[in-house]
C-alpha cells in the first residue's frame, strides 16, 4: 500500500523535511500591501521574505486560500503513483482552504484523505510531521489513519507570543482601542488555539525575556511534553533576544527540541518577531 502526502504552507515545514518525506507542497499565495504577489513555495527564502515585509510597514498583507482545482490537480497527479493521499490542512476556522479540500475530495473520492489540523504554523507542522513519519514507516494502517490523526490532534499543544498587536490589527482581528491600549502598556499577547481550531488569548505578557521564559516554563510544567514521542518544536521569525534566551533556557533544561522558522504564510498574520512552542503531551 503506497500512501502519499500533501501539505500546505500554513504549516511551518522546512524544505529539507518536504524533500525527505516527499511531500507535495501546496503554496499559499501572499499579496503585499503594494499589490505584489508571492507564493509560499517549498524553497522560498524565508529570511529574504522577512526583509521584503519590512519594506512595506503600512497596509495589510493577505493570504489567498488554495483553490479546489489546485488540490484536485495535485491529488490526481499523485494518485497515478500512490494508492491513497493524505492531506492535513490548516485550521478550517482560519482559512477556506479546508472547505476547498473537502470539495476536492468530493471530486476525487475516498482515496484522498482530508484532515482538519485545527491548528496553524508550528502546531500544524508538528502534527503533520509526526503523522507523516509514522505513516511512511508503516506504523498506521490506511483504515485507521483518521482515527490516529484525531488522537494526535488531541495530544497537541501549541502556544505562541507576538511582539505586538500590529499585524493582528492590520488583519482586522482586534479593534483599534485594544491595539492602542496594548501598545501603550507594551503588552505582548500570548495566544493558543482551542479545540475547534480558533485562536484565543491565554495571557498578556508585560516585560521582556524573563517574563516570556516564565510563561513557557509554567506551561511546560503544567503540561509536560512527551519528548520520547516527538521533540518539542520551537519556532521564531527574525532572531531577537527572546529567541536566544529561550534557546539557552531549553538547552539548560535538557528538553529535546527542534528549531523551526515561521513561514511567510503565518508570518504575515503574526508578525516577523513572534515565537512559539508546540509539543505532544
Image: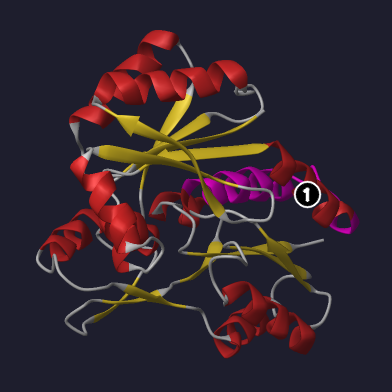
Residue found at x 60% / y 31%: 230
Q: In the rendered image of this protein, does residue 206 appear above or below residue 248? A: below
In percent of width and height, residue 56 lies at 13, 69
Residue found at x 56% / y 44%: 126
In the image, taking residue 55 as reference, residue 175 lies left or right, namely right
Question: Most prominent secondary structure in the magenta stretch?
Answer: helix
- Residue 50 or residue 175, whichever sits in front: 175
- Residue 168 or residue 38, whichever sits in front: 168
In the image, taking residue 205 as reference, residue 97 lies left or right, namely right
In the image, taking residue 220 as reference, residue 99 lies left or right, namely right
In percent of width and height, residue 170 lies at 29, 67
Residue found at x 63% / y 48%: 194
Q: Quadrant of residue 113?
A: bottom right
Q: In the rendered image of this protein, does residue 170 appear above or below residue 107? A: above
Residue designated by label 1: 150
* Quadrant including the C terminus: top right
Q: Which residues are magenta?
A: 122-143
Is any atom of residue 247 visible in this view? Answer: no
Amino acid at each position: 500500500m503506497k500512501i502519499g502526502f500533501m501539505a500546505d504552507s500554513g504549516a511551518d515545514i522546512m524544505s529539507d523535511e518536504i524533500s525527505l518525506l516527499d511531500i507535495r507542497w501546496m503554496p499559499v499565495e501572499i499579496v503585499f500591501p503594494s499589490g505584489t504577489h508571492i507564493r509560499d513555495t517549498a524553497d522560498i527564502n524565508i529570511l529574504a521574505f522577512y526583509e521584503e515585509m519590512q519594506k512595506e510597514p503600512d497596509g495589510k498583507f493577505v493570504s489567498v486560500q488554495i483553490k479546489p482545482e489546485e488540490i484536485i490537480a495535485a491529488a490526481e497527479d499523485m494518485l497515478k503513483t500512490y494508492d491513497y493521499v493524505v492531506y492535513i490542512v490548516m485550521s478550517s476556522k482560519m482559512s477556506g482552504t479546508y472547505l476547498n479540500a473537502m470539495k476536492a475530495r468530493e471530486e476525487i473520492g475516498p482515496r484522498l484523505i482530508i484532515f482538519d489540523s485545527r491548528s496553524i504554523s508550528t502546531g500544524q507542522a508538528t502534527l503533520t510531521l509526526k503523522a507523516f513519519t509514522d505513516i511512511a514507516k508503516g506504523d498506521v494502517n490506511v483504515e485507521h489513519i483518521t482515527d490516529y490523526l484525531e488522537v494526535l490532534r488531541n495530544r497537541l499543544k501549541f502556544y505562541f507570543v507576538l511582539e505586538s498587536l500590529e499585524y493582528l490589527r492590520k488583519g482586522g482581528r482586534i479593534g483599534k482601542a485594544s491595539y492602542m491600549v496594548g501598545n501603550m502598556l507594551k503588552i505582548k499577547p500570548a495566544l493558543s488555539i482551542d479545540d475547534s481550531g480558533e485562536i484565543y488569548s491565554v495571557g498578556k505578557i508585560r516585560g521582556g525575556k524573563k517574563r516570556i521564559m516564565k510563561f513557557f516554563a509554567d506551561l511546560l510544567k503544567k503540561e509536560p511534553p512527551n519528548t520520547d514521542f516527538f521533540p518539542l518544536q520551537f519556532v521564531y521569525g527574525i532572531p531577537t533576544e527572546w529567541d536566544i534566551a529561550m534557546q539557552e533556557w531549553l538547552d539548560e533544561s535538557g528538553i529535546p527540541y527542534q528549531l523551526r522558522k515561521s513561514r511567510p504564510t503565518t508570518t504575515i498574520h503574526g508578525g516577523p518577531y513572534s515565537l512559539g512552542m508546540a509539543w505532544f503531551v
